[in-house]
Image: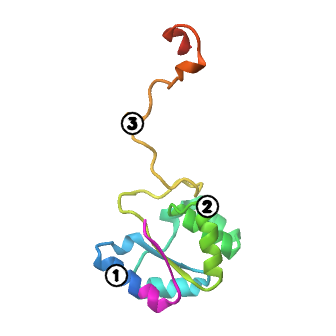
Amino acid sequence: MTIKLVRNEEEANDFIRQLTQEGYHTDNIYALAYNADRTDAIVENTEINKVGMTEQGIIQTVANIFRSRGDELIAKMRSLGVSETDAAHYERMLAAGDILVLTWPAEIEAGPQDSGIDSERPPEKDTLLTQPVVNPLLFAGSPEDRLR
C-alpha cells in the first residue's frame, strides 16, 4: 500500500498521474479529503475509484450516514487496510486541509468484511493449522496427554 499526504488538488492529481505511470490501475487508487466536494472533484478529474460499498460493505456504508465526517473518513481508511492509529493520525491531517492519496494493493480482490475493521483476506484453508500447537514446557506427561 502506498499512502501520501498532499497539500492541494494539483499535488493530488500529479501524484495520481505518477501512480498510473508506475502501473497502478485507477480502480486501486483512492483520494480522501475532509471536504467531500474536494474528494469528489479529485475523483472526477482523475477517474480514480471512490471508497464505497465495494470497499466498505453495506453495513459500514449505511453507518457512515450517521457518523461525523472525521469518523466516516477513519472508517473508510480502515476499510482500505490502514491501521486504527494511522487512520486517526491521517484524519487529523485531513481536518487540517491535507488530502490523502492511497493505493489498495491489486492482490486484494474482495472488499473487507462488513465490520470495516478486518481488511485482509482470511488465509486459505490449506494454510490453517489442523492440530493445536502445544508448548511442551507447559505440560508434564506423555505427548498424547499434551493434546488432550
Mark drawn on residue 18:
1
Sequence-wise first label, 1 or 3: 1
| Location of residue 133 in the rendering, given as x and y in whole percent from the top left corner | 50, 26
Q: CA distance from mark 1 to mark 2?
A: 27 Å
Q: Which residue is mark 2?
A: 84
Q: Name the kind of residue labelled 2 in the image.
A: Glu
Q: Which residue is mark 3?
A: 127
Q: Residues within 10 Å of mark 1 (few under 14, many from 20)?
A: few
Q: Secondary structure at mark 2?
A: helix
Does residue 26 appear to the left or right of 140 in the view shown? Answer: left
Q: Which residues are magenta?
A: 1-13
Q: Quadrant of residue 48?
A: bottom left
Above or below, 121 against 72 in this view is: above
Sequence-wise first label, 1 or 2: 1
Q: CA distance from mark 3 to mark 2?
A: 27 Å
Identify the residue at horizontal 53%, vertical 87% (top origin). Answer: 7
Q: CA distance from mark 1 to mark 3?
A: 37 Å
Sequence-wise first label, 3 or 2: 2
